[in-house]
C-alpha cells in the first residue's frame, strides 16, 4: 500500500495542503506537551472542504487528527500519522437567535474563544467559559475538551452552554445534534473519556477529544450581560495556612464568588517573574486568587471591606492585597495567572530533547481531601528530589500540579508520582482528568478511573460513529 503522504498529495489540486516535506509543517507538529509526525496538514477553507477531505480519507482509510490551535495539554491535537485537519479558517459568528428557551449564538467551530466572548458581549450577552488560553484556543475545541476556566467555579464547564452541534463524521456524513428542551446538562468535573451515564448524544460529543466527529458549528446558550465583579490576589505568609483558608472559604461558598483559585509557594515564585508583578506581594508565599461579583456600589464597598477583614482575621496583611476593580487591573491579574503555565511550559520544552519535560496533572478530588492529597504530592516530589508546584482551580478541588523534569530518569520518577496521585484522587472519589482530558499522553491513566467494561463501552460508541478508528487515532484508546 502506498504511504499516506503519497496518497494525500492528490488533495493538493483543490485544497490548501502542506505536504510532509514542506518546512511549514513544523508549526503543526506539536501541542503544549507532545510532538508528532503528520503526513500532511490541510487547512480547510470551509465546511465543504472539510467534508471532501474527510470523505477522501475515509475512502483511503487514512487517519485524521482534528486540530484547532493545538493548545491541548495531552497530545490530543497532535497527529502521529496520517492527516492533520486544521479548523483554523472556519471562523466567525453565524447567527444570534431567540426562542422560548432564551438567546443562542451559533459560531463556526474554528472561532477563537476570546472572539466568541467579545462578540456576544457586544450583542449584550455573556458566555462565561474562559480558559486561560482563551486568546488562542477555539470554540469547537473547547467543546471537544469540555473546557472550563477560572469562572467555571460559578458558571460550570463548556457543556453547560452547548445547545446544538453540527458535526461531520469520519465518512463525511453530517449530523445535527441538539439538547432536548427538558434536559439539564451535567456540571460534573470528570473529563476522563466519554460521558456515558445519563448522557444525551450531544453529551457524547462534548469532551470526545476529536475521536467521534469534526464539529463545524457550535450553538451556545447565552446568559444575560455579565454581572460586575472585582478580582483580588490575597497574600499568605505560609502555604498550608493559605490552603486551609481556601478550603474554609469553599464551605462558605456564596453564589456571588465567581472564581476561587490558589497559587502555592513555587507557583508564586514563577508568577513573581512577571515584569508587572506588584512589589508589595514579593514576600507572599502563597496567594488566593478570587473574583467577586456585586450588584451595586454599596454592595461592592461592603464586599471589599469584608475581604480585607477576612484576610486580617487570617493573620495576614490586607494592605498589600492586590485589588482589581478596573478592567485594566483585572487584565493584569489575568496576565499574572497566565504567566505561570506559559513560563513553565516554555521552560519544560527545553528538556524535551533530553527526555524530560513538564508533567502536568489534571486529577481532582472533593475539596475535603485537598489538603491530604496536596501534602502527599509535596512529600513525593521532595522524596524524588524534583521541583513541583500546585496552582489553579483549588476551590473546586482541582489543582494543576506541575513537575519540571530535566531528563528521562526524572521524567519517569515524575510520572510515577502522577500515577500515585491519580490513584489517590480516584480513591477519594475524584478522577484522573478534570479539565484537559486524556489525549495521547495520559491514555494509561484512563484505567485507573474506569473498569475495563466501561472502557469497552466507550470503544463501542467510538465504533458506532467511526468504525475504522480513523479520527483522533491514539486519543483515549491504544492504537490497535
Ligand atoms: C497556557 C494554557 C492555558 C490553558 N488553560 C486552560 C483552561 O483554563 N481551561 C481548559 O479547559 N483548558 C486550558 N488549556 C488547554 C487548551 O487550551 C484547551 O484544551 C482548549 O480547549 C484547546 O483548544 P485548541 O483550539 O487549542 O484545540 P486543540 O488543542 O487543537 O485541540 C484540542 C482537542 O480538540 C479536538 N478538536 C479541535 N477542534 C475540533 C473540532 N472542530 N471538532 C472536533 N474536535 C476538535 C482535537 O482533536 C483535540 O482532541 C490551556 C492550555 C494552555 C497552553
Image: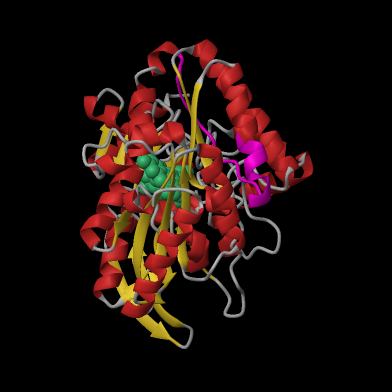
- Give 317 or 418, whichever is nearer the viewer: 317
- Residue 368 part of the magenta segment: yes
Q: Quadrant of the C terminus?
A: top right
Color theme of the render: secondary structure
With respect to residue 38, does 237 lie above or below?
A: below
Q: How many marks?
A: 0
Above or below, comparing residue 473 to residue 46 in the picture? above
Nearest the viewer among 119 and 18 is 119
Q: Residue drawn 63% across and 44% down?
A: 370
Q: Which residues are magenta?
A: 355-374
- Could you say which quadrant of the image residue 41 lies in? top left
Position in image of residue 134 (x %, y %): 33, 52
Residue at 40% from the left image edge and 52% from the top image edge: 131
**Residue 14, x across and y down, in percent:** 25, 45
- Residue 45 visible within the image: no
Q: Let me know if residue 220 is in the magenta part.
A: no
Residue 264 coordinates in the image, percent (x, y): 47, 38
Residue, x 35% and y 24% (percent of image)? 347
Q: Residue at x 44, y 61 (%)?
A: 309
Choose between 325 and 363: the one closer to the eye: 325
Give coordinates of residue 453: x percent, y percent. Answer: 78, 44
Residue 72 as seen in the image, left or right of residue 276: right
- Residue 351 in view in this figure: yes
Q: Is residue 249 left or right of residue 336?
A: right
Question: Does 12 sit left or right of 217 as displayed?
Answer: left
Q: Nearer the viewer, residue 427 or 268?
A: 268
Amino acid at each position: 500500500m502506498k504511504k499516506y503522504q503519497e496518497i494525500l498529495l492528490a488533495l493538493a489540486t483543490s485544497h490548501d495542503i502542506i505536504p510532509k516535506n514542506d518546512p511549514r509543517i513544523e508549526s503543526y507538529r506539536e501541542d503544549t506537551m507532545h510532538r508528532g509526525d503528520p503526513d500532511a496538514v490541510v487547512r480547510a477553507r470551509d465546511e465543504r472542504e472539510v467534508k471532501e477531505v474527510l470523505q477522501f480519507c475515509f475512502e483511503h482509510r487514512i487517519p485524521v487528527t482534528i486540530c484547532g490551535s493545538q493548545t491541548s495539554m495531552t497530545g490530543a491535537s497532535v497527529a502521529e500519522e496520517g492527516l492533520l485537519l486544521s479548523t483554523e479558517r472556519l471562523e466567525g459568528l453565524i447567527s444570534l437567535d431567540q426562542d422560548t428557551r432564551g438567546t443562542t449564538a451559533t459560531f463556526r467551530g474554528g472561532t477563537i474563544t476570546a472572539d466568541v466572548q467579545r462578540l456576544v458581549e457586544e450583542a449584550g450577552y455573556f458566555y462565561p467559559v474562559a480558559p486561560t488560553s482563551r486568546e488562542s484556543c477555539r470554540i469547537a475545541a473547547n467543546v471537544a475538551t469540555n473546557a472550563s476556566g477560572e469562572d467555571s467555579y460559578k458558571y460550570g464547564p463548556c457543556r453547560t452552554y452547548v445547545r446544538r452541534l453540527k458535526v461531520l463524521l469520519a465518512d463525511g456524513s453530517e449530523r445535527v445534534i441538539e439538547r432536548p428542551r427538558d434536559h439539564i446538562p451535567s456540571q460534573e468535573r470528570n473529563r476522563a473519556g466519554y460521558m456515558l451515564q445519563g448522557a444525551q448524544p450531544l453529551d457524547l460529543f462534548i469532551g470526545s477529544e476529536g475521536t467521534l466527529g469534526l464539529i463545524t458549528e457550535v450553538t451556545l446558550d447565552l446568559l444575560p450581560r455579565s454581572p460586575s465583579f472585582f478580582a483580588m490576589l490575597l497574600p499568605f505568609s505560609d502555604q498550608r495556612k493559605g490552603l486551609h483558608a481556601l478550603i474554609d472559604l469553599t464551605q462558605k461558598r456564596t453564589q456571588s464568588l465567581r472564581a476561587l483559585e490558589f497559587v502555592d509557594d513555587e507557583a508564586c515564585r514563577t508568577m513573581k517573574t512577571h515584569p508587572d508583578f506588584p512589589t508589595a506581594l514579593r514576600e507572599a508565599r502563597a496567594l488566593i486568587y478570587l473574583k467577586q461579583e456585586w450588584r451595586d456600589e454599596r454592595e461592592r464597598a461592603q464586599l471589599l471591606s469584608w475581604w480585607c477583614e477576612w484576610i486580617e482575621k487570617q493573620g495576614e496583611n490586607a494592605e498589600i492585597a492586590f485589588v482589581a476593580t478596573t478592567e485594566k487591573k483585572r487584565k493584569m491579574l489575568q496576565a499574572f495567572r497566565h504567566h505561570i503555565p506559559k513560563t513553565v511550559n516554555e521552560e519544560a520544552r527545553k528538556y524535551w530533547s533530553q527526555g524530560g519535560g513538564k508533567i502536568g496533572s489534571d486529577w481532582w478530588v472533593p475539596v475535603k481531601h485537598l489538603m491530604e492529597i496536596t501534602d502527599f504530592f509535596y512529600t513525593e516530589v521532595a522524596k524524588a528530589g524534583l521541583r513541583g508546584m500546585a496552582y489553579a482551580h483549588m476551590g473546586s478541588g482541582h489543582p494543576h500540579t506541575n513537575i519540571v523534569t530535566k531528563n528521562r530518569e526524572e521524567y519517569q520518577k515524575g510520572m510515577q508520582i502522577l500515577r500515585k496521585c491519580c490513584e489517590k484522587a480516584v480513591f477519594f472519589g475524584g478522577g484522573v482528568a478534570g479539565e484537559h482530558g486524556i489525549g495521547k499522553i495520559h491514555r494509561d491513566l484512563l484505567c485507573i478511573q474506569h473498569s475495563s467494561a466501561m472502557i469497552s463501552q466507550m470503544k463501542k460508541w467510538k465504533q458506532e460513529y467511526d468504525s475504522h478508528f480513523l479520527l483522533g487515532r491514539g486519543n483515549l484508546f491504544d492504537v490497535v
